[in-house]
Image (cartoon, grey):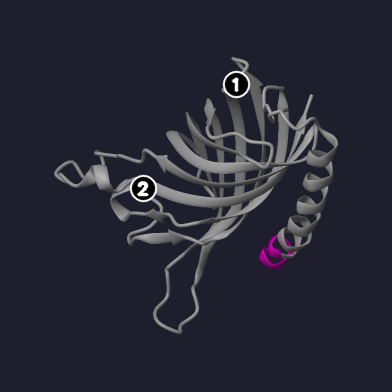
Amino acid sequence: MRKAVFVLLFLLLPASTLLAQDWRRGGRPYEQYRDNAVDLTPFVGYRYGGTLYADQSNLFNQNVDVQSSVNFGASLGIPINPYGVKVELLVSRQNTHFTNGGGLFSPNENLGDFHITYYQAGVLFPFAQSRAASPYVSVTGGVANLDPAISGVSASNRFAASAAIGVKVPLQRNLSLRLEERGYYTALSNYDRCGSCYYGYNHDLYQGETNLGLDFKF
């Protein structure tokens, strides 16, 4: 699946350059690209990082890692001013598994399937917009649904937040290619497991993902 993501990126980037050039040539010279419409962006990406510490759950007696894998989702942008600032609603899911991390040149052991879904809402701020590209930053907050596929274990919802930086490259007037790097923070503090752990604040879940999507404007 990871290879499919990179192949898609390889195929889309040259096409996006040609389409964007055609669209720009057809517009008026003084016309500036404005990203001020409602947009829907389905995306696919690759999520990495994340450690579940033994003192934060009853699942394992050792620290375990979250295996890096493909993620997918969609975002909805609702403009709140004429200059591209938007309320952003985001869902992003990863189907992965726990691993012991392994050692150098040794295989990782699959300790059980794990599903992570982020439900987020926040604000997207564009900057330095031009007809060639619309870079932006985004900050969101919401919940993470943590769902181990292990018998007798129930899912848990925890507070989560994210921050992202990305760019939208217009292909047509109502279609853009969107490339984004996003980082997530999920609160896992569980002082019942380790009441004397003064370092518990550092045992939360941190992940990052690189996403590629098509941005449809309405």
What is the magenta segment's predominant secondary structure? helix
On screen, residue 1 versus residue 98, left or right, reads: right
Position of 214 relative to 119 (above/below): below
**Percent from the top left, x then y, of residue 137?**
50, 36
State the separation of the CA atoms marked 2 and 1.
Answer: 45 Å
- 2 drawn magenta: yes
Could you say which is closer to the camera, residue 129 or residue 107? Answer: 129
Which disc, if any, is residue 83? 1
Does residue 61 appear in the picture of this structure?
Answer: yes
Which element carries disc 2, helix, strand or loop?
loop
Q: Which mark is residue 213?
A: none
Amino acid bearing label 2: Ser
Q: Specify whether 154 is left or right of 132.
A: left
Look at the picture and state if 6 lies above or below 142: below
Residue at x 70%, y 68% (from the top left corner) = 3
For the record, the magenta segment spans: 1-6
Q: Residue at point 63% right, 53% down? A: 45
In this view, the residue in front, 124 or 76, is: 124
- Crowding near the residue tagged with mark 2, few <14, some 14–19, many ≥20 C-alpha atoms within 10 Å: some
Compared with 117, 83 (above or below) is above
Category of crowding for the residue at label 1, using alpha-carbon neighbours closer than 10 angstroms: few (below 14), some (14–19), many (at least 20)? some
Residue 45's place in the image compared with 195, above or below, is below
Image position, residue 97 (x, y; %): 54, 59
Front residue of 106 and 152:
106
Q: Which residue reaches farthest bottom?
A: 105
The structure residue drawn at horizontal position 53% and vertical position 61%, both measured from the top left corner, is 68
Count of numbered badges drawn on the protein: 2
Q: Is residue 91 left or right of residue 181?
A: right
Q: Is residue 214 magenta?
A: no
Give, as a three-letter code, the residue at label 1.
Answer: Tyr
Would you name the residue on which mark 2 appears?
57
Give the mark nearer the N terminus: 2 vs 1: 2
